[in-house]
Amino acid sequence: MFDNSFIISFIGFFIVLTPLVFFHELGHYYAAIKSGVKVESFSIGFGPEIFGYTDKNNTRWKFSLIPLGGYVKMKGELVNIYKETEKKAFDKDAFLKASLFSRFLIVLSGPLANLILGCLLIIGLYFFNGRYVSPPIINEVIASKPAIKSGIVSGDKILSINEQKISDFYEIKNIVENNPNKSLSFEILRNDNILFITIVPNEFYDKNSRKILGRIGVTAVPPELKKLTILPALHFGLIDSVNMTYEWLKGLKSLLFLEVDKKDIMGPIGIAKISGSSLDRGLSSLIFLMAILSINLGLINLLPIPALDGGYIMIFTYELIFKKPLSGKIQLFLLQFGFLFIISLMILVTAFDLGF
């Protein structure tokens, strides 16, 4: 039978995934009804319905058998694929009868809902629970490295580098990495005394980024949980959301150029394991994981791959530029290709999860 770790991972996966899918589809749903488009069904999962109900607007809300995702079914088609569809006199509440701007907005609103949700979860977590901050204090100084040769000792607090104020250890890391073989002036607080020390970071070749980075040979003290008031929570929540987006884009670039190890690629099984682990560590870990995955889900859906939201945006962009819809045959080919690509990618990622 299944062990406890599998059950916890399974439960954690659905606790994490279901709200993210719901908010994504809710974004589509809300934009559709505000644009006057009829929503026929709102499903969490695919395949046969398990249970559901029909609201006063005759929209069927349901949970379906295959729980990997969800969808909002609107009246009519999302794109003009067949000539007979183009000639058909749609009702005024069909998707294709909506203005081009409304169709853009309906498709965009799903990923946008995930991005907003991720940001709000991070802001709420920082406000109610706190934000982990690595103070700019030196923990360990590694022998034979530039820091110890220049006189840095454990316990030193870095106040500024080249007159740039330092608030956490990440800023030290960022400045040092971006300045290999360059002279840096460190302002240091040691035993209530201010010292100025010049350090020249060594060159270090980072295999992951394939870049030459700077290193001085110091480590950080353990991070501290610092509770924030609402304005700092908003500030750092927005900044960290933007940083996550930037790191995701860097990861996508590395993936496209085959610069990542397959062990670093995570699929449904990997997410389930992390979800179960987060569930074990408590609510704050689970919420933070949900925030990261929500932002990732929003960004993935914006990729210009047919069958994803970004693919429909690409098709509508063609219509905007050329003042006419893309050929039905081309649209059908793109959607079929996109569907096969996504299925193939899911199979490949799952194989990586399983260690193949």
Image (spheres, rainbow, N blue to C red):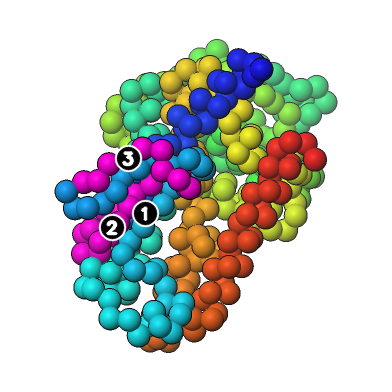
* x, y percent for residue 112: 38, 53
Image point (67%, 24%), residue name? 219
Look at the image and tell me whether residue 114 can be seen.
no
Q: Residues within 10 Å of mark 1 (few under 14, many from 20)?
A: many
Question: Which of the 4 quarters of the picture holds residue 130?
Answer: top left
Tell me the quadrant of the picture where the N terminus can be found. top right
Tell me the quadrant of the picture where the C terminus can be found. top right
Drawn side of residue 45 relative to residue 76, left or right: right
Drawn side of residue 338 relative to residue 106, left or right: right
Q: Mark 1 or mark 3, which is nearer the start of the sequence? A: 3
Q: Residues within 10 Å of mark 2 (few under 14, many from 20)?
A: many
Q: Count all numbered tags in the image, as a single digit.
A: 3
Q: Are marks 2 and 1 in contact (CB under 8 Å)?
A: yes
Magenta region: 29-55
For residue 52, the mark is 3
Q: CA distance from mark 2 to mark 1?
A: 7 Å
Q: Mark 1 or mark 2, which is nearer the start of the sequence? A: 2
4 or 209, nearer to the observer: 4
Drawn side of residue 133 relative to residue 155, left or right: left
For residue 134, the mark is none
Residue located beneath label 1 in the image? 72
Q: Residues within 10 Å of mark 3 (few under 14, many from 20)?
A: few
Most extreme residue toward the right, as rendered? 144
Residue located beneath label 2 in the image? 39
Q: CA distance from mark 2 to mark 3?
A: 15 Å
